[in-house]
């Protein structure tokens, strides 16, 4: 025999109305009471009738998150924080990926909306404006993350500011012969903003990159591109658009017999776990993945509840570890 809401209420020592509030609007219930109710639900293996709730409230309790890839720890950390910030028992999270394919992203968004998603978490701003119009017509709220801008609600950070701070550090060390190892920029405003921001700062100083490589995400892609960039023996620093490419560059440097940072400076972006286990540990830009996920969840809930909500810009930070140093006085063939 299946447990009922009355059984849950009796075990928790609360009214059925309180059980209902815990499931439908947990923020209105005291944490201690909510804990008792959720423990009773787990003990009784109670399954709420979400279909009936959806009909009554015109909500399904489904939140959709559409990310470029599930292989990148950057998105894993943010999505994990986002999910844990959603009220227990109120929302279920569905995650879809699109492999950096704009058409596939559109299909995933449409599929989640077709399943009744109450709101969506999307990555970056770089997509067909028609998608935003389509969501607006259907009154599906969304929050953008991992970027910032004025056109849409977001919880993110400034990719340009982050990379500019890193390139400024490299310049302050005395480097002038700098190359950049970037992720693919087509359809990826995060990678594009990092590359363009770095170029703009160099231009202000009357400089330009010795070389630029755009490659797909991956250690070996980073290693191969680094080796190609270092064919120019004047290069003393390689700024990377993410930590995985930077880790690949470090691997290639070791293979080539180059000392890091004595012979070449290598920097990353994101500060995911790999940045602290490379040798030397990677100098990088720290992105506030956890707080970003939490703030995105809070903002999306406000929008779902019909409130205006306020976008939030989070800071990035340089994490100075062991892969940066002044340029060598010379590096001859």
Image (tube, helix red, strand yellow):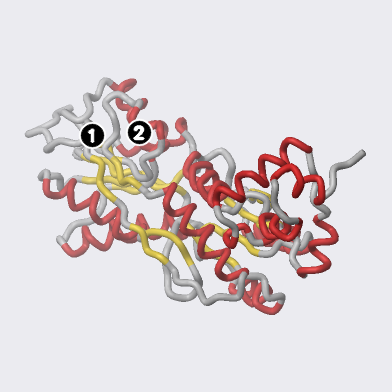
User: Which image quarter holds the C terminus?
Assistant: top left
Would residue 71 be found to the left or right of residue 131 on screen?
Answer: left
Q: Nearer the viewer, residue 264 or 316?
A: 316
Q: Residue furthest left?
A: 329
Residue 222: give x, y in percent of width and height: 41, 36
From this view, report whether residue 127 is shown above or below residue 211.
below
Q: Nearer the viewer, residue 61 or 174?
A: 61
Could you tell which of marks 1 and 2 lies nearer the N-terminus?
2
Residue 173: give x, y in percent of width and height: 12, 44
Q: Separation of disc 1 and disc 2 at Cα?
A: 9 Å
Tag 2: Cα neighbours inside 10 Å, few (<14), some, or many (≥20)? many
The residue indicated by pointer 2 is: 275
Residue 321 bears which disc, if any?
1
Would residue 300 be found to the left or right of residue 237 on screen?
Answer: right
Q: Nearer the viewer, residue 53 or 167?
A: 53
Residue 122: give x, y in percent of width and height: 57, 59
């Amino acid at each position: 025999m299946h447990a009922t809401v009355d059984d849950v209420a009796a075990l928790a020592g609360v009214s059925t109305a309180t059980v209902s509030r815990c499931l439908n609007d947990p923020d209105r219930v005291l944490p201690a009471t909510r804990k008792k109710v959720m423990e009773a639900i787990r003990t009784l293996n109670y399954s709420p009738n979400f279909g009936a709730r959806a009909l009554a409230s015109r909500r399904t309790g489904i939140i959709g998150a559409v990310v470029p890839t599930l292989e990148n720890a950057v998105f894993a950390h943010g999505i994990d924080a986002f999910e844990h910030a959603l009220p227990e028992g109120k929302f279920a999270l569905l995650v879809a990926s699109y492999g950096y394919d704009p058409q596939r992203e559109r299909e995933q968004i449409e599929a989640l909306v077709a399943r009744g998603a109450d709101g969506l978490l999307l990555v970056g701003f770089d997509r067909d404006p028609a998608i935003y119009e389509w969501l607006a017509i259907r009154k599906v709220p969304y929050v953008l993350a991992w970027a910032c801008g004025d056109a849409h609600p977001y919880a993110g950070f400034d990719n340009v500011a982050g990379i500019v701070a890193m390139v400024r550090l490299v310049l302050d060390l005395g480097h002038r012969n700098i190359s950049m190892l970037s992720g693919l920029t087509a359809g990826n405003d995060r990678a594009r903003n990092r590359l363009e921001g770095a170029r703009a700062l160099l231009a202000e100083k009357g400089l330009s990159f010795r070389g630029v490589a755009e490659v797909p995400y991956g250690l070996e892609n980073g290693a191969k591109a680094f080796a190609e960039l270092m064919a120019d023996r004047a290069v003393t620093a390689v700024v990377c658009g993410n930590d995985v490419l930077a880790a690949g560059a470090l691997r290639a440097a070791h293979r080539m017999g180059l000392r890091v940072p004595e012979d070449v400076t290598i920097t990353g972006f994101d500060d995911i776990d790999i940045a602290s286990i490379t040798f030397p540990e990677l100098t990088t830009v720290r992105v506030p993945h956890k707080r970003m996920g939490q703030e995105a969840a809070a903002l999306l809930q406000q929008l779902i509840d019909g409130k205006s909500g306020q976008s939030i810009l989070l800071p990035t930070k340089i994490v100075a570890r062991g892969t940066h140093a002044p340029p060598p006085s010379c590096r001859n063939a």
